[in-house]
Amino acid sequence: MVTSHWAAASVQTAAGRRRGAVLERAILDAALEQLSTVGWNGLTMEGVAAGAQTGKAAVYRRWSSKEELVADALRSGLPRWETVPDLGSVREDLLALCRRAREAMFSRPGFALRSVIHECDSEQAERFHAVIYEGVVEPTVSLLREVIDRGIERGEVRPDATDEYVLDVIPAMMMYRSKISGCEWSDVELEEMIDRLMVPLLRRDGA
């Protein structure tokens, strides 16, 4: 029992000594964990502090509001996609991107992001518009454009396919069906979306 108390005290002491970037990382991780488990409505600054094993004052010194904390947590946690798969065909490249998107959607940052999108009211959601656009929408569209442009160069895809509506199809479908019907996007479902929707949409006339 004495050993147990000593160990617990040691953990608390070590947590109390954290400073700067180490403590900030712990707080941001705790915010993502709360968002992915209890959601936006259940997240509290007190709960984040407890999860980070620090005091509430340490959280408020860095972030004056729940919105500011969550915005920074999402920025820090969202995946960075810098490379585009090149598997020899636009179909396979799109499937690879969709699998990456699925992994991101069902990761801890993905659950956190969806809790914000689904639970915030319109005024609150507006505060996260830039975070979502810069961290999710813009990079996803950029990668899709690169894959489709490569398909055009190969002669697989019609030359005018890279318009904004075409580029919105995959992100919109994945978010919509995930939210409305709880779709988890199995490999079969991803293949059906690509084969029944994207391939015909991108195909050259007569192909």
Image (tube, helix red, strand yellow):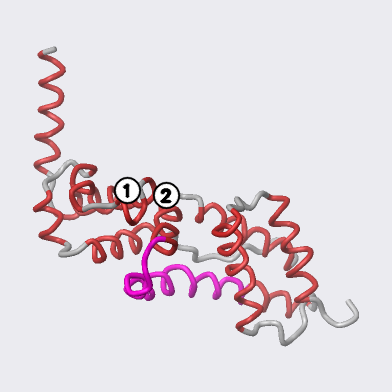
Which SS class for mark 2?
A: helix
- List x then y, in percent, for residue 167: 62, 76
Of the 4 image quadrants, the one containing the C terminus is: bottom right
**Residue lying at 75% horizontally and 68% vertically, measured from the top left:** 197
Q: How many marks?
A: 2
Q: Is residue 198 above or below residue 4?
A: below
Of the 4 image quadrants, the one containing the N terminus is: top left
Q: Going by the image, does 80 lie left or right of 160?
A: left
In the picture of the structure, the residue carrying the numbered disc 2 is 108
Tell me, for residue 19, which label it has, or none.
none
Q: Quadrant of residue 21?
A: bottom left
Instruction: Give yes or no for residue 107 being in the magenta stretch.
Output: no
Q: Earlier in the sequence, mark 1 or mark 2?
A: 1
**Residue lying at 57% horizontally and 57% vertically, measured from the top left:** 178
Nearest the eye: 100 or 107: 107
Nearest the eye: 195 or 154: 195
Q: Residues within 10 Å of mark 2 (few under 14, many from 20)?
A: many
- List x then y, in percent, for residue 73: 30, 59
In the picture of the structure, the residue carrying the numbered disc 1 is 34
- List x then y, in percent, for residue 88: 74, 64
- List x then y, in percent, for residue 44: 23, 52
Q: Going by the image, does 76 lie left or right of 181?
A: left
Nearest the eye: 56 or 90: 56
Q: Residues within 10 Å of mark 1 (few under 14, many from 20)?
A: many
Tell me whether the residue at label 1 lies in contact with that at label 2, contact meaning CB atoms closer than 8 angstroms.
no
